Image: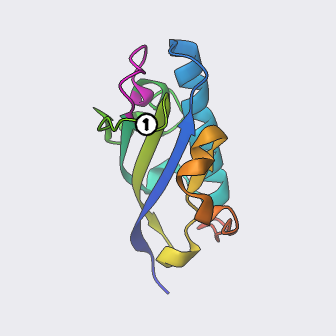
């Protein structure tokens, strides 16, 4: 099977609206997505972050851009649509990337309270082959 363009989703909640907490959560989420999918920044096509309206101390893309190799990845921040009763202080991500797997083999990552957004994914953590293996 050849390499394919796939979307990878993820989300994480943030303990407080501070630049440090947003940066820490962004790195935790991206570390988990990269690890579980054996991703390398050179295979990323683009990454969009959305944040709930209660997070405005830092753009998640600003934190991501500090990661090795991420300074050349097209990054975008947007405000997530507000829905009454929705999960507060949440960062969501949609990555478009090249991977050597089918959709059902991609590992979407939801951490902290964001696990409640996709409880159906708790049992689907899959080890994905790397280009470097």
Q: Relative to residue 115, is residue 58 depicted above or below?
A: above
Name, please, the residue furthest toward the bottom: 1
The residue that appears at 56% across and 17% down in the rendered structure is 16
Q: Is residue 101 visible?
A: no
Q: Residue at x 43, y 45 (%)?
A: 93
Q: Is residue 114 left or right of residue 2?
A: right
- The residue tagged 1 is 85
Q: Quadrant of the C terminus?
A: bottom right
Question: Magenta: predominant secondary structure element?
Answer: loop
Where residue 13 sits in the image (x, y, percent)?
56, 33
Q: Nearer the viewer, residue 86 or 59?
A: 86
Residue range (magenta)? 51-61
Report x, y in % for residue 90: 49, 34
Question: Residue 123 occupies which quadrant of the picture?
Answer: bottom right
Where is residue 105 shown, x and y percent of the image?
57, 74
Find residue 91 and report its horizontal and vertical position in percent. Answer: 47, 35
């Amino acid at each position: 099977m050849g390499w394919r363009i796939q979307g990878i989703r993820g989300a994480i909640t943030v303990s407080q609206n501070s630049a440090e907490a947003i940066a820490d959560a962004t790195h935790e989420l991206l570390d988990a997505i990269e690890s579980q999918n054996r991703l390398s920044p050179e295979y990323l096509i683009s990454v969009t972050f959305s944040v709930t309206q209660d997070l405005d101390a830092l753009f998640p893309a600003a934190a991501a851009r500090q990661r090795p190799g991420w300074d050349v990845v097209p990054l975008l921040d947007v405000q997530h649509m507000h829905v009454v009763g929705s999960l507060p202080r949440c960062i969501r991500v949609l990555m478009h990337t090249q991977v050597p797997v089918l959709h059902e083999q991609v590992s979407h990552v939801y951490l902290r309270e964001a696990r409640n957004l996709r409880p159906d994914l708790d049992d689907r953590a899959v080890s994905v082959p790397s280009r470097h293996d």
